[in-house]
Image: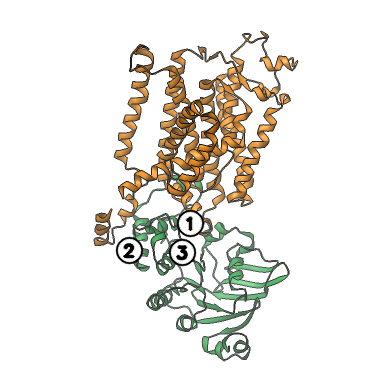
Chain colours: A orange, B green
Amino acid sequence: MKREDIEAAAAPADAAFALSRLHGASSRTVLAMLGVAVIVLFVVFPVCNLMVPATSALHISDYTVTLLGKIMCYAIVALAMDLIWGYTGILSLGHGLFFALGGYAMGMYLMRTIGREGVYQSELPDFMVFLDWKAYPWYWSFTDHFWYAALLVVLVPGLLAFVFGYFAFRSRIKGVYFSIITQALTYAAMLLFFRNDTGFGGNNGFTDFKRILGFSITAPTTRMALFLITGAALLGFLLLGRAIVRSKLGRVLTAIRDAETRVMFSGYNPLYFKLFIWTLSAVICGIAGALYVPQVGIINPSEMSPANSIEIAIWTAVGGRGTLIGPVLGAAVVNLGKSWFTQVLPEYWLFVLGLVFILVTLFLPRGIAGLWTRSRT
Amino acid sequence: MIPSGSTDRSGGSSPGRVLQPGVDISHRGILYLDAISVSFDGFKALNDLSLTIDAGELRCVIGPNGAGKTTMMDVITGKTRPDAGTAFFGQTIDLTRLTEPEIADRGIGRKFQKPTVFAQHTVFENLELARKADKRVWPTLRAKLDSTAYGRILAILDTIKLASEARRLAGLLSHGQKQWLEIGMLLMQEPQLLLLDEPVAGMTDDETMRSAELFLSLAGEYTLVVVEHDMDFVARIADRVTVLHEGHVLAEGSMQQVQQDEQVIEVFLGR
């Protein structure tokens, strides 16, 4: 760093240096990391899970595959959170809602594929039979088509975020007020989904899925396929995020975070920039939710609980806001810790999580990713 | 009145797309405030304020605290809507109907009292973001820095004497440097009218002197309205001075005329 500074001073007019400033990692590092990730995800995992016998030390269990698949979904959510919070400075405490909506949209399709194999052997899902409903409500139309469910996965969180965001940002609601409203939004949605009459299975939600696109949902190969698709989605969104934050638009987003009035008086309308990244972030969460549900096998309204959304913010903060790899690390570290801790000392997990959050805020304001950048400077 | 160095800058000098028709200054005036009143909870921040600024002029606005200087800028830039009165930019642009970004886009740049720059961006990037361009979402996502824009940024870096700081984060600059960077950002917007709220506050004597030179060199090509408390500075740069008091124009004229005005001496200068 020091030497570059001296060189820059020696060639004062050469402002090209200014643009080559590292927005995160350099292209070469990114390529190398991407290569390693692709090999581990797409070669090591399938081989060690499906081909290496269970007795071997190199075998990766189905449990591990599902756990990591789940964590990758969380990582996608944390990444989406980082785009809106870390880069744009807007803290959402309702991102769990978009995740759950994506999950519910996929869940509707998965419920339809159960067919007559439910407890009551009806065309309708068990919970509808239980409510004595005779037919699917209108909003379940076409959900037996995968493509339609996939469309809902994107459209429902996207539209909700767009409409909500338009009014919130147009009214210039900012900071903690915005956070509280998003929290209220997810809480209200949770209450709505808890009702049996809403038509989404009430507090039990959707579960007991049998198959997806004709494949048995519990088969190891299906699980591996879902795992790989999730991995590909994570890498894809990382690259998308990188393209966005390195663009001029990405610099405008950070500028909104740091000095919104100056952005306005520079001729940008922050409303549309916020709306763009907010809606994109919600859509990414929805997709993560849709990938999550077939792997975990259940979706219920507790995914919309305020605590869940707060946890998303914690993953992002622990990993490092304003970096791309940070939230991925944060989601992984916190959730691996959680799955270990809830087996050993389940009742203390929330205390530990709270403590971690406080310690990170105090001593590692730039998160785990900050350790790395600090060690380089 | 208008110094040489033409006021016609619309002739293809801009590399960015000109989104809106330029300001019509055919009657010499570039800014017309007429009978503007603004009140906050009964307090009249502006009271029947009327003011005309000619194109190419360097106007200083002075007045005691609470005279309405900042509110006046808020009205011009769309931050505050007047309760009564009209504000026109040139002959045709009604400022009371436009939002802040739209007004910025039509060619009014504003520097705040407290220097406001993008702390986490480099000096270069600050200028890049401010540059006149199509500032809607999609074009911004696709924007690439071409050589014309690059050259323009380098030129402004020289003007504001920050070329050697180009790749530093703006948040690390000294107070005076931030003031200059903010002025540079305004220039990148290629505005017709620059509103500068206490531009030399917190500057060293040397920096203040250099600012005076800069503003004098900008007048003519741009129209400048400077709100300032530093009377020596005002005396050095002003063509004309407007004195505000209780939201109203108290006096207007050259610095000398204003200084000899009985009313002005009473409320402001004479203390």
Q: Position of residue B70 (x, y in %)?
A: 58, 70
Which-is-in-front pick, marks 1 and 3? 3
Q: Which residue is mark 2?
A: B163
Q: Amino acid at mark 2?
A: Ala
Q: Residues within 10 Å of mark 2 (few under 14, many from 20)?
A: many
Q: Earlier in the sequence, mark 2 or mark 1?
A: 1
Circle 2 — which element?
Answer: helix
Do residues under tags 1 and 3 come within 8 Å of each other at their CB atoms?
no
Up-down relation of residue A153 to residue A128 (above or below): below
Q: Amino acid at mark 1?
A: Val
Q: Which residue is mark 1?
A: B18
Up-down relation of residue B8 to residue A189 (above or below): below
Q: Earlier in the sequence, mark 2 or mark 3?
A: 2
Please state the chain letter of the residue tagged with numbered disc 2 in the rendered image.
Answer: B
**Residue drawn at (34%, 66%), measured in percent from left and top?**
B158
Please state the chain letter of the residue tagged with numbered disc 1 in the rendered image.
Answer: B
Q: Position of residue B173 (x, y in %)?
A: 39, 63
Please state the chain letter of the residue tagged with numbered disc 3 in the rendered image.
Answer: B
Out of A275 and A29, give the one closest to the viewer: A29
Which mark, by number, is residue B186? 3
